[in-house]
Amino acid sequence: MSNNDQDIQRYRLNLPRHVCIIMDGNGRWAEQRGKLRIAGHRAGVETVRTIVEASGEYGIEVLTLFAFSSENWRRPAQEVGMLMELFVTALTREVRKLHRNNVRLRVIGDIGAFDTKLQQSIHEAEALTRDNTGLTLVIAANYGGRWDVTQAVRALAQEVAAGTLNPADITEERIQARLCVRELPEPDLFIRTGGEQRISNFLLWQLSYTELYFTDVLWPDFDKQAFDVALQSFAQRQRRFGRTGNQVEQLTRA
């Protein structure tokens, strides 16, 4: 067992339940190698496979990956088109392997903006893996945190308009119950690759108490070792949720 693996074993009791990742740097990775940007996205799919497998090995319950934001439509049309094709190909190629490994797939976001073929692939993949009990893999596609909160508030407004909900009864819990990942634990660890240090409209509501981890490693180079370093960073942090450090230590000893 390598020293890195020993560290992971030592920190195993403090692994996150839910990890979310902005997979940044695909285009720059390709450009650095004199390739088209889509080559970086294809390489990034291989990294997704590696991190999904590692998450399953470590017993992480939920892995959420930001695949395509609602702002990504602003990219050149050719790149967007290639990304859509790659999404369909990856779903078709990977879903049965996910199913064999007991992974449950969920796709969150406004998928109605995608073409019929991609929507059908998403529905079929979710249906195939719905009853699996291992890792839950969440793919955020045409997703934005502001959109997520807006659609939740709109649903509550419709209930108020229908007379089934009193405005005074709108609580954080009611909003939470209408968000895309309402039945899943909130993220414990947020990772962004590629050197940028922002959350870019990703899971805005859910990241309130999430530990943030930024790395310069471009997503296609984010291998299992790099993932282990992020997990070790998380394991060494004290999560207070508004309490003092002493209070947390007392709760831990109790």
Image (cartoon, grey):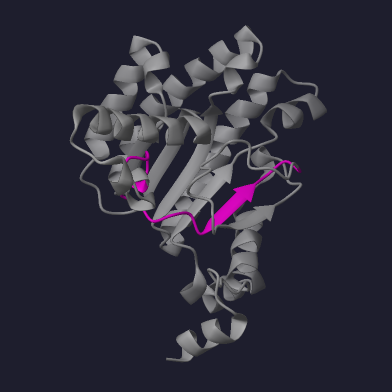
Give the answer, above or below, for where 6 lies relative to 150. Answer: below
Quick one: 240 or 28, which is closer to the camera? 240
Query: Does 69 sit left or right of 194 as displayed?
Result: left
Displayed quadrant of residue 108: top left
Query: Does 9 sit left or right of 157 as displayed?
Result: right
| Magenta stretch prevailing secondary structure | loop
Give the extent of the magenta segment: 176-195
Whole-percent x and y of residue 112? 37, 17
Residue at point 50%, 89% (across, down): 250
Query: Does 184 sit left or right of 161 as displayed?
Result: right
Residue at point 66%, 55% (across, down): 213
Whole-percent x and y of residue 254? 42, 91
Residue 193 belongs to the span the image colors magenta? yes
Quick one: 3 or 66, which is closer to the camera? 66
Whole-percent x and y of residue 142? 48, 25
Residue at point 47%, 29% (across, down): 147
Residue 197 belongs to the span the image colors magenta? no
Indicate the quadrant containing the N terminus: top left, top right, bottom left or bottom right: bottom right
